[in-house]
Image: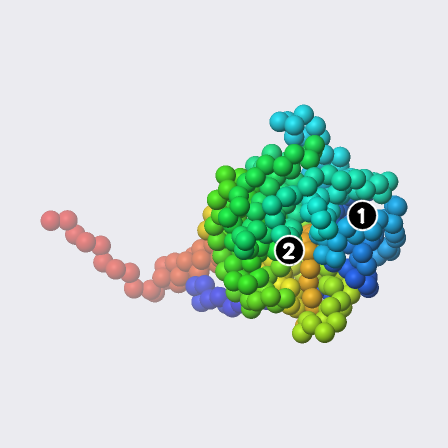
Amino acid sequence: MLAAVSVGGLLLLVPADATSEASWEQWEHLPGVLDLAGPLPDGSLVAVAGGQLKSLHSDGTVSGYTGQVAAPGAESYLAGSSGRRVEAAGCTFAADDLFWLRLAPPLGIVRVDRQGAVRPFADFPGVESLSGIVSDRVGRFGYRLLVTGVHLGKTVLEAFDCRGKGTLITSAAPLLEGGLAVAPATFGDYAGQLIAADENSGAILALSPAGGWSVIADSGIPKGGDIGVESAGFVPPGFAAGGWAYLADRGTPGNPHPGTDSVLRVSARDLRRAGVQEGDLLVASEGGGVTVAVRCKPACSVREVAVGPPAGHIEGHLLAVADHPGRATAAAAASSSAWSLPVLALVLLLTAAYYLVRLRRRRVSGAPGTAQPAARSAG
């Protein structure tokens, strides 16, 4: 979009700031889809669908995960491994392991390896239910697996090392549910903290490694059970150069938002046009997939950037995946300074126009026959 600007009597057209809201599209029909994790080292995503794990490839093909693993619970959220070493435990998380909430007693987590073998990983005693899971790939929680549960109306957060040993972080956080995320180092005062959404209040919260919590922002999205904010995820480095964001839209018959039983996606290009940048937090609502971008540098701002199918019933994590993560530095620079060359050209053009106008005026004022001001005599 262009805007008209008058400089020195000259009318110039310059770029105007304009954004357009993106739309989540139904990409792959996947009955019973509940959550997404990945990408794995081979680039594939993993979906929880119909009580099993499914491999989801970039060309849209879906295959049964090795071993046809059965879900350990009706709403068993899934997380990929951090792939990082935990120095205090003297071990390393395997890069292609998956961790799944076990919702049947005893509550806890199971580990699924690349061959599909399922093994108990850790128990999570002292809670009535489990509500979220994510790996710390930033490091402020020691690269451990973060799991939330509910006890007496409060959220309990524990961090598990690669040997399955849990450490209590807090037992008094507000109720949280759905797709959790860990903030990157660029996320202002909340860098490295656990980010979660409260669908009942509409708040987006941060939980620190020390056990404290704070409200980052109000999402501005309609709130309430099966309606409010549900899924969170960060835009990774390299995303500006190309990629896709993904959501699970679960079929839920009889619900006001019955879902489409499909994996939704939206392109990096469309999100960029909506004003999204690398490092932004994306949060989508359970009802209809209304999506906001949160940017904290250091103050936090919230902006609606995308909408999903009106019938959508969103569950689990929001995944944003870059096509070429290795281009992180160049892509980030391109994203943060997308207008650099046009703005420089505009400045040069305006400067040239200004001096051209001055030069013309001097020539007119100094032409023969033009009255000149009298010189002031001394004394």
The residue at 48%/53% (across/down) is: 215
Q: Could you tell me which secondary element the residue under label 2 belongs to? A: loop
- Residue 279 vs residue 46: left or right? left
User: x%, y% of residue 153?
Assistant: 54, 55
Label 2 environment density (alpha carbons within 10 Å; few <14, some 14–19, many ≥20): many
User: x%, y% of residue 189?
Assistant: 48, 44
Q: Amino acid at mark 2?
A: Gly
If you read the primary sequence from the N terminus, does the residue marked by circle 1 or circle 2 appear first?
Answer: 1
Q: Nearer the viewer, mark 1 or mark 2?
A: 2
Label 1 environment density (alpha carbons within 10 Å; few <14, some 14–19, many ≥20): some
Q: Amino acid at mark 1?
A: Ser
Q: Could you tell me which secondary element the residue under label 1 belongs to? A: loop
**Residue under pointer 1:** 44
User: x%, y% of residue 82?
Assistant: 69, 38
**Residue under pointer 2:** 178
Q: How many marks?
A: 2
The residue at 58%/55% (across/down) is: 176
Q: Foreground residue, 64 or 10?
A: 64
- Residue 154 vs residue 123: left or right? left
User: x%, y% of residue 340?
Assistant: 56, 50
